[in-house]
Image: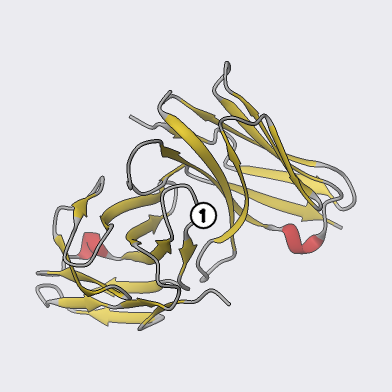
């Protein structure tokens, strides 16, 4: 049973516009959420995270929003740039343990010139 | 600068071989992890370790074992490689459960 779901395998956005990547989760024990970016043949790179005590975290062009009641989070990239083309993974961790992250299947973001 | 290093970028091994994938981190992190990434399946946790000589099974441990003799090094072992273990393997480490994990560059393993 998939606990972290990214329902859009791919997303195409024009350069300069906003990219919105969505993620849903089912495990109410998750209390820490992260977004990673991955280029082909490279390891994932950490982008931004949010704790369950917050509903928004911002870092430059990247903002993550968390809606706990809906068990939904989203990553906003504004403005989108060609270098943002990559696969984006949503990840979550349960509170109270040292378990690894649970990842979604990823969304391939394509920035069109 | 944070560094997680995996010993090989690409490996080709034969079915039945014993395969060792090595990972070293230089950040004095307690936690280390092994994931595999497959198209359409995302990243799946194989094993993790939260201390030297400690290990815990992740979601897909079958066919794998791990070793953590030193804090900075975490090895993934394929006891008898099979073609369904052809994948991208990713090592990661984190300071604790409330901080981000840092990933190595990945090892693309092909079992023929």
Determine which residue is flagged by label 1. B100
Quadrant containing the C terminus of chain A in the rendered view: bottom right
Q: Nearer the viewer, residue A89 or B10?
A: A89
Q: Quadrant of residue B87?
A: bottom left
Q: Secondary structure at mark 1?
A: loop
Q: Residues within 10 Å of mark 1 (few under 14, many from 20)?
A: many
Rendered position, B45 above or below A27 = below
Give the residue at the far right of this rendering.
Answer: A16
- Residue B52: horizontal and vertical position, in percent? 22, 67
- Residue B86: horizontal and vertical position, in percent? 29, 65
Q: Nearer the viewer, residue A109 or B60?
A: B60
Q: Nearer the viewer, residue A105 or A52?
A: A52
- Residue A68: horizontal and vertical position, in percent? 57, 22
Rendered position, A44 above or below B15 = above
In this rendering, position of residue B70 left or right of residue B94: left
Quadrant containing the N terminus of chain A in the rendered view: top left
Q: Quadrant of residue A53?
A: top right
- Residue A107: horizontal and vertical position, in percent? 59, 45
Give the residue at the far top of this rendering.
Answer: A69
- Name which residue lies at 81% across and 51% down: A61
In this rendering, position of residue A111 left or right of residue B11: right
Q: Quadrant of residue A58?
A: top right
Tag 1 subunit: B
- Report the label total: 1
- Name which residue lies at 38% across and 74% down: B107
- Name which residue lies at 39% across and 36% down: A94
In this rendering, position of residue B21 left or right of residue A96: left
- Name which residue lies at 40% across and 36% down: A95
């Amino acid at each position: 049973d998939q606990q972290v779901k990214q329902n859009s395998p791919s997303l195409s956005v024009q350069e300069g516009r906003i990219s919105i990547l969505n993620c849903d989760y089912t495990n109410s024990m998750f209390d820490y959420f992260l977004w990673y970016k991955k280029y082909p043949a490279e390891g994932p790179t950490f982008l931004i995270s949010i704790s369950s005590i917050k509903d928004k975290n911002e870092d430059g062009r990247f903002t993550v929003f968390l809606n706990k009641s809906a068990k939904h989070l989203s990553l906003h990239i504004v403005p989108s740039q060609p270098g943002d083309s990559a696969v984006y993974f949503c990840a979550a961790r349960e509170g109270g343990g040292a378990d690894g992250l649970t990842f979604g299947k990823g969304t391939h973001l394509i920035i069109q010139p | 600068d944070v560094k997680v290093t995996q010993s090989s970028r690409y490996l080709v091994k034969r079915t039945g071989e014993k395969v060792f994938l090595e990972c070293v981190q230089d950040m004095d992190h307690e936690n280390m992890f092994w994931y595999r990434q497959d198209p359409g399946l995302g990243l799946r946790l194989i094993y993790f370790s939260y201390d030297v000589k400690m290990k815990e099974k992740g979601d897909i441990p079958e066919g794998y074992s791990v070793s953590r003799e030193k804090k900075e090094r975490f090895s993934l072992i394929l006891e008898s490689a099979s073609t369904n273990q052809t994948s991208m393997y990713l090592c990661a480490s984190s300071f604790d459960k409330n901080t981000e994990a840092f990933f190595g560059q990945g090892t693309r393993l092909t079992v023929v």
